[in-house]
């Protein structure tokens, strides 16, 4: 499954076979690039979701799977061209791969990254490669002759360029991922499933990763996923365990595939059939899913329930799960009215500075919306963060460190920077200092920030996003002592 939804592959490596032939040291250059690039990307993405790289080292020039290669190029999010004189030679298949990729999407969506194995003449460079980001993986020897850079000839330079390349690719993939994942996934209303229990049914082996991905999504919505541990093997222990968890569930989610579930000799139901029947008997809300593929040739005993399942992409199913949880989640009790904020009495509109990781930008904007109606607020700039922080914070009545999807290290680092600047550089500083918590729920260790001090306040909630707490900050500022 690709890192960027909607594509089969995240990166398609296009290269002339000449560049992958073993050099005098036995190095197959493109094969090495593929191997080391995967490591560099994995080291920078702290998630089980890793980009899919397509690298083909078959001798396709013998006529093998030529059409498939072009389809794979069309199915990739990013086109990585390993450029050299053979790449741009007339009639080379690499140019057909480039053409297939570019012809599969609008020019604005063509993300091409060029790795130069060796330089080429300007007049030989295809128009499609004029604008893309270029990375030179060669050096000039004492005779000014370009030589391919390898991890053996110059490990330090090669590794530096490799990680720069990987970082650029990750940034492009993350941009595409944010655009393509439905808002219900990346910006799902926090707490849509707060307090709800969702039972994820047992799946066939081919859906284990899919189940884990859905489990993470549901947990981000604030719901508890059952069972807390793996199911027992199919049999009496399984049916007893499923029944016990079913009694606690507010919603049951069953993932189905063309692969038949387990069924022992003499069993009345298969594993999948039992879960469906038990859920029906318990009159629990249920959502069933399968991939949108043809099941006309499926003839085994699970076909009837397979036909009941909603055929859609997993991303579409996530939207359906969120909506169902919103329907099932009881409305929150009305909050006690906050004291009115009388701007006329205060004589000025307080200014609040908000530090926010990109993952929390949507929440920061909501906090700013409330703050702007009561005074003024500024969210930390994406660029030159420290410069913006130093220039703005001394003029703020409150500094708020937003902690939702942000890594704990991000919040800790900015708390430490603030504390140091407050004691060494700032002549004035905010009268109110706060961490503003937001979902997802955090463990006790995650919640305990390493940088803290007496007087650092806590607002918000890690269970459900409560932007209205921003009003509490203004109430305190309006009634607090003058700086």
Image: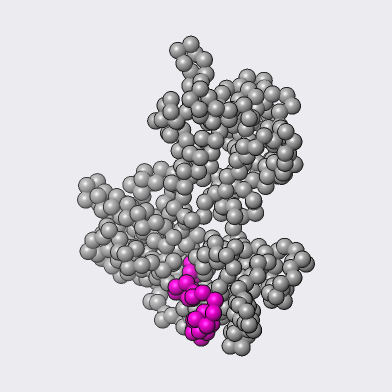
In the rendered image, residue 223 lying in the magenta stretch gets the answer: yes
Q: Residue at x 63, y 22 (%)?
A: 85
- 198 in magenta: no
Which part of the image, by quadrant, shows the C terminus? bottom left
Decide: is 234 above or below 369. below
354 in relation to 298, above or below: above
Q: Point out residue 273 in the picture as x, y percentages from the top left corner.
A: 64, 79
Q: Residue at x 50, y 37 (%)?
A: 165
Q: How is the image coloured?
A: one colour
Q: Residue 287 in the image: x percent, y percent? A: 62, 75
Relative to 155, does residue 409 appear above or below in the rendering? below
Image quadrant where one finds the N terminus: bottom right
Q: Name the one closer to the observer, 65 or 179.
A: 65
Residue 188: name its quadrant: bottom right
Residue 447 position in % (x across, y down): 33, 65
- Is 344 on the left or on the right of 105, as rendered? left
Front residue of 416 and 42? 42
In the rendered structure, which segment of residues is drawn in magenta? 219-248
- Residue 297 location in percent, x, y? 77, 66
* Residue at figure coordinates x 46%, y 42% from the top left: 40
Determine which quarter of the picture holds residue 268: bottom right
Front residue of this view, candidates 374 and 464: 464
């Amino acid at each position: 499954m690709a890192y960027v939804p909607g594509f089969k592959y995240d990166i398609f490596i296009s290269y002339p076979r000449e560049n992958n032939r073993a050099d005098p040291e036995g190095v197959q250059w493109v094969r090495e690039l593929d191997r080391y690039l995967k490591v560099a990307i994995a080291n920078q993405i702290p998630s089980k979701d890793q980009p899919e790289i397509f690298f083909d080292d078959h001798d396709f020039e013998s006529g093998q799977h030529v059409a498939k290669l072009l389809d794979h190029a069309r199915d990739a999010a990013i086109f990585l061209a390993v450029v050299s004189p053979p790449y741009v030679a007339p009639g080379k298949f690499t140019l057909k791969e480039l053409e297939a990729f570019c012809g599969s999407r609008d020019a604005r969506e063509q993300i091409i990254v060029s790795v130069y194995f060796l330089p080429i003449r300007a007049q030989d460079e295809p128009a499609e490669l004029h604008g893309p980001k270029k990375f030179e993986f060669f050096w000039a020897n004492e005779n000014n002759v370009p030589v391919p850079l390898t991890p053996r000839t110059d490990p330090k330079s090669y590794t530096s360029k490799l990680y720069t390349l990987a970082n650029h690719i990750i940034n492009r993939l993350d941009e595409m991922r944010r655009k393509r994942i439905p808002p219900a996934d990346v910006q799902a209303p926090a707490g849509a499933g707060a307090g709800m229990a969702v039972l994820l049914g047992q799946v066939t082996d081919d859906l284990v990763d899919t189940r884990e991905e859905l489990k993470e999504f549901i947990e981000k919505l604030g719901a508890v996923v059952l069972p807390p541990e793996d199911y027992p093997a199919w049999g009496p222990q399984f049916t007893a365990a499923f029944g016990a968890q079913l009694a606690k569930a507010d919603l049951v989610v069953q993932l189905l595939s063309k692969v038949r579930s387990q069924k022992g000799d003499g069993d009345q139901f298969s594993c999948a059939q039992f879960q469906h029947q038990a859920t029906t008997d318990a009159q629990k809300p249920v959502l069933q899913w399968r991939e949108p593929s043809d099941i006309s040739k499926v003839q085994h005993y699970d076909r009837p329930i397979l036909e009941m399942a909603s055929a859609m992409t997993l991303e579409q199913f996530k939207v359906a799960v969120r909506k169902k949880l919103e329907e099932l989640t009881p409305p929150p009790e009305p909050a006690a009215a906050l004291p009115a904020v009388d701007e006329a009495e205060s004589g000025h509109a307080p200014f609040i500075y908000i530090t926010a990781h990109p993952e929390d930008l949507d929440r920061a904007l909501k906090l700013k919306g409330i703050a702007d109606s009561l005074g003024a607020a500024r969210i930390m700039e994406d660029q030159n963060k420290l410069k913006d922080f130093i220039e703005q914070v001394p003029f703020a009545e409150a500094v708020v460190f937003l902690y939702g999807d942000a890594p704990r290290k991000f919040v800790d680092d900015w708390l430490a920077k603030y504390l140091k600047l407050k004691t060494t550089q700032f002549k004035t500083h905010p009268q109110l200092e706060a961490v503003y918590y937001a979902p997802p729920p955090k463990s006790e260790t995650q919640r305990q920030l390493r940088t803290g001090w007496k007087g650092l306040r806590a607002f918000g909630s890690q269970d459900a996003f409560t932007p209205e707490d921003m009003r509490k900050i203004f109430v305190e500022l309006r009634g607090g002592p003058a700086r």
